[in-house]
Structures are given as structure tokens and as C-alpha cells.
Amino acid sequence: MATAAVPEFDDLEPMDFQEEMLGSSNSSIADTKFDVTVGYIEEIIMDEEFQDLQNNFLDKYYVEFEDTEENKFVYTDIHKEWVETIEKYLETNLARKMPGFHMQEFAQALESRKDEVCGEIFDMLVSFTDFLAFKELMLDYRAEKEGRSIDLLEDLVITSMSKPAGGAAPAPAVGGGSRQGTTQPQLAVLPAAGGSKHSSKHRVK
């Protein structure tokens, strides 16, 4: 079945989005705008330039963060620089694709639609406004760099969340886990007992 073409925003004025979707309901306009924004974010963060920018920042500061309840004063400065560097880069590139885009407006929409965004992307976006999420991101990266992150082959159990067709017995999962059935055809990646507290889930690769 053919799908409707997604409108291009590169050459639109800030209000043209509303005019372009005049025949649609307000909720439909909001849904389309949100989905297109998320699509552009995925494109931007997978680009090599963004990856280099992000990794250089993480490499520069990860050693400053320690897994304790105490928060050093320097953490605040580093978080501010993270926002000014990573969020600013993302917002600037989104504004080029969607004139009139504002990260604050999108962040408000994200709060009520977090289930519609990939976990890694959501974690990164939240790190701009949530200091604790940012600190966890840095600790995850430090654990990975120091070899304390979870070994994907030995310490993870990949569990199928869909029921095998015909009620056939499930096949063994990686790491000795078992498949559990629900009606949703997706995979769940779970840490095995004794795994590391931190993983590299927050950093988009």
C-alpha cells in the first residue's frame, strides 16, 4: 500500500508548515511535525560530523566524572558546555531543515511523547535539560572506555518478545536466555545477573 509523501521543509518559511497542512486537523499537523523532526534528528546524529563532535566532547571530559552521590562544581560547567556544543549543533541543523524550529518547543512536545522516540535518542535529548541524565551518560561512557561496560556476548540476554508461530518451542537466546512471548514482534536486551551497573546505551553510535 502506498504511503503519503512526507513534506519537505528545507525551503519553507516558518508558517508554511501550517499552510501546507491546512486541510488536516491540528492533532494531525502536530503528529506530522513531530515525526518529521524526529526523522531529521536521526539523520543528523548519524552523520559523521556529529559523531566526531560528540565523541571528542566525551573523550575530553569523561575522566572528570565519578560514580558517587557527590557532584563536583566542574560538572555544572561541563554540562553547560555540552548544551552549548551538542544541543546548539543539533538545533542549528534542524533549523536549516525546518525554518522556525525551536528546541524548547520540541522538548515540550517530547515530554508527552517519549514512547515514540528511540531510547538512545530520547536519552541524549533529555541530557540537555536533565543534569542527572547527563551525568549518567558520562559515567556510561567512562565505564565503556575503562572496559567496565557490559559484554554483549557474555552478559546480555536477548529475549524475543513475540510468540513463535504455531506455538513451537522457543529457540535458546544468546547468553543462555529464553524467549518469552507477547503479541509485540520486538526484541528486548536485558542485563544478565552480575552485569555492570552502567552500559553505553546513552551514546548514539
Image (tube, rainbow, N blue to C red):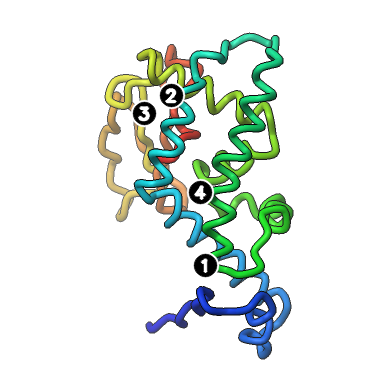
Residue that carries the numbered disc 2 in the rendered image:
59
First in sequence: mark 3 or mark 2? Answer: 2
The type of residue carrying mark 1 is: Lys
Label 2 – label 1 distance at C-alpha: 29 Å
- In the rendered image, the quadrant that contains the C terminus is top left
Q: Secondary structure at mark 4?
A: loop
Q: Secondary structure at mark 2?
A: helix
Q: Residue at x 46, y 48 (%)?
A: 182
Label 4 – label 3 distance at C-alpha: 20 Å
Q: Is residue 24 above or below residue 59?
A: below
Left or right side of 75 for 167:
left
Residue 97: image tag:
1
First in sequence: mark 2 or mark 4? Answer: 2
Is the residue marked by circle 4 packed among few (<14), some (14-19), or many (20+) residues within 10 Å? few
Label 3 – label 2 distance at C-alpha: 29 Å
Residue that carries the numbered disc 4 in the rendered image:
118
Q: Is residue 30 above or below residue 148?
A: below
- Foreground label between 1 and 3: 1
